[in-house]
């Protein structure tokens, strides 16, 4: 299960022929993503396990997941935008039911990211799943 925003990204990826174009597209998604207020870039929102500085600040509207994110690296900011597109607007149950690795593999990201970046993506997904699990309890 993926949000409509993620499906749009997946469709755009289908039209891009090579990884360099996809890479630029991910960076553009990061540039377009609203920033996270510096006051929210605190240890409680920092995602450990990422090579770059990453913060994800989740909010819940009832049972609906929303989050904003930030990074000091442009490609990572783009990866945050992709991950948030996957989850934002889903219910907590849908967040927990989403196979993020399978969804992201549709984009071919797993084939083109360094092991450090892949670990960072997994850490962001784990953080989001933890928030959804705790909020569902």
Image (cartoon, helix red, strand yellow):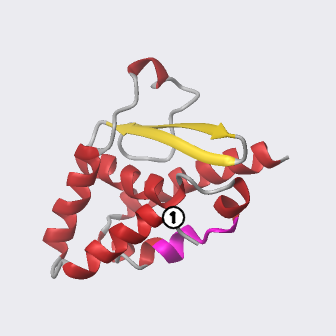
Q: Secondary structure at mark 1?
A: loop
| Mark 1 lies on residue | 3
Residue at the (28%, 48%) spot, across then down:
30
Residue 79: x %, y % from top left: 36, 55
Q: Is residue 13 left or right of residue 105?
A: left
Quarter holding residue 104: bottom left
Decide if residue 50 is on the left or right side of residue 128.
Answer: left
Q: Quadrant of the N terminus?
A: bottom right
- In this picture, is 105 found above or below 76? below
Disc 1 residue crowd, few under 14, some 14–19, many 20+, Cα 10 Å: some
Percent of width and height locating residue 68: 46, 39
Q: Decide which of 36, 75 is in the foreground and name it.
A: 36
Q: Residue at x 45, y 25 (%)?
A: 41
The tally of labels here is 1
From the image, give the main secondary structure of the stretch colored magenta. helix
- Find the magenta span and give its range: 97-103
Left or right, 10 with reference to 56: left
Q: Which residue is rendered at x = 75% and y = 51% of the image?
A: 133
In the rendered view, would you say 58 is above or below 64?
A: above
Q: Residue lying furthest top in this view?
A: 39
Q: Nearer the viewer, residue 70 or 93?
A: 93
Does the magenta-highlighted stretch encompass residue 12?
A: no
Q: Residue furthest right?
A: 137
Q: Residue at x 54, y 26 (%)?
A: 43
Q: Position of residue 120 (x, y in %)?
A: 45, 53
Is residue 102 covered in magenta?
Answer: yes
Which residue is at the front of the view, 63 or 21?
A: 63
Q: Is residue 73 above or below residue 3?
A: above
């Amino acid at each position: 299960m993926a949000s409509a925003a993620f499906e749009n990204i997946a469709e755009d990826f289908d039209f891009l022929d090579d990884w360099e174009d996809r890479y630029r597209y991910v960076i553009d998604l990061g540039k377009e993503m609203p920033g996270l207020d510096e006051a929210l870039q605190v240890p409680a929102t920092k995602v450990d396990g990422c090579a770059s500085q990453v913060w994800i600040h989740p909010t819940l509207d009832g049972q609906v997941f929303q989050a904003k994110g930030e990074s000091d690296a442009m490609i990572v900011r783009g990866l945050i935008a992709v991950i948030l597109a996957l989850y934002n607007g889903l219910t907590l149950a849908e967040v927990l039911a989403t196979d993020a690795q399978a969804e992201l593999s549709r984009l071919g990201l797993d084939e083109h990211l360094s092991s450090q970046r892949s670990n960072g993506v997994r850490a962001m997904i784990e953080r989001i799943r933890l928030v959804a699990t705790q909020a569902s309890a």
